[in-house]
Amino acid sequence: MNSRLARSGKGFARRANRRDGNKGFYLHSPTSKLSLWRLFLVWLTLGAQSFGGGVATFALIRNAAVERFEWVTEEEFLKDNSLSRITPGMNILALTILLGKRAAGAPGIFVSLAGLILPSACITIVITAFYTQIQGVPVIASALKGVVPATIGLGLFTAFDMAAGTLKTSCKGGRSQLWAALGILLLSGICAAFLKPPVILILLIAGCASGLFQWRQTVKRKEEAPE
Amino acid sequence: MSGMGNVPSLHSDLVPQHWATERQFVEALAVGQLAPGPNGLWPVSLGFLIGGVRGSLFALSAILLPPLLVLLLDKLYRRVESHPAVEGFVRGLSLATIGVFVVVLLDLFRHGDMSFKSVAVTLGTVLLALTRRIPIPGILALAAVVGVLWR
């Protein structure tokens, strides 16, 4: 049943039908050939469709992993995303590696990277070879003029979704958690906008601040809990 | 950083040594924007310009290696996962990531042409995406069409 849903690929609209307990279509045979092939196809279509740069790719990956095929929960995705941004190298690739691992272990990693990169790398080489001819075509330039702001809009939407998810989780921890979360969100944005420190610094400071806060909360809760 | 994070360091590594010309560099960056997939693949284009298919394969493998370190990071993370501070740490990280991401997006927007058309397309995209009825590639294709038709 899940493979039918996976194949329909009708995007967001299909979400409501999937509350049947199955955590996506890799559950039964995570490393069986059929699932690996499906996984490869998912990444392949992702790689081939994501015009508009890393933001579009990111949005597509998240959409596929969390919403359409559901092999990862929002929280797991956020964790993987955070880790991928601290690692050296392209964070999209690191994210792909982690998500591939969740879907199907080591073969999953290989298959996900291959699917994502192959079409892009090939098309990149082809475009490079013919670049002098393509460059002048005004249609392409105008199309890009439309796609670039759309990519930014897409990024804003994705950020909104992710923020909503995280804040909802913080809500569960109580009012102070929610405020702390909002505070970190806003402060990190303000710091990034006006101070322009290296990104990883902001991330680590935010992480430590939040971690300490969480720790204090847990300790406080233990003290307040009836023995 | 939309695949551009390594531009300064690669530029200073390759161009002064005459391993790549300025022109090849600029061309590779443009191709990176045009081609689908992650923007960070522009070094593959540069590799092709410098050394043909072999050059591009070489560049590709160079790109693929560093992210594999994330697996190590993941292992370390799983070991400390259960500590209460760690969940908070990750959440703080995630929130800051989102905050920085939004700032970068707005920066990118400011570097664009900031015309009424751009603003309209950006807002339109957000609204369309919020409906959750139109798949993302569809939205981007629509944006391309709008770009062509609306001058």
Image (cartoon, coloured by chain):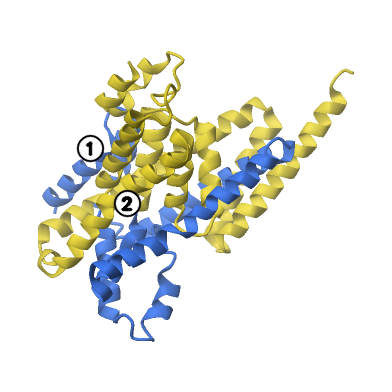
Chain colours: A yellow, B blue
Query: The disc numbered 1 marks a residue on which chain?
Result: B
Q: Residue A139 in the image: x percent, y percent? A: 11, 56
Residue on which disc 2 sits: A117
Q: In this view, does A147 lie to the left or right of B17?
A: left
Residue B92: mark: none
Quadrant where the N terminus of chain A sits is: top left
Viewer-closest of B94 and B103: B94
Toward the bottom, the furthest residue is: B17
- Can you tell which of label 1 and label 2 is closer to the viewer? 2
Q: How crowded is mark 1: few (under 14 residues within 10 Å), some or many (20 or more)?
A: few
Viewer-closest of B11 and A156: B11
Query: The disc numbered 2 marks a residue on which chain?
Result: A
Q: In this view, does A122 lie to the left or right of B149?
A: right
Q: What residue type is labelled 2?
A: Ile
Quarter where residue A10 is shown: top left
Q: What element carries label 2?
A: helix
Q: Do the residues at discs 1 and 2 belong to one chain? A: no
Q: In this view, does A93 lie to the left or right of A224?
A: left
Q: Which amino acid does label 1 sit on?
A: Gly
Viewer-closest of A39 and A220: A39
Residue B138: mark: 1
Viewer-closest of B127 and B14: B14
Quarter where residue A19 is shown: top left
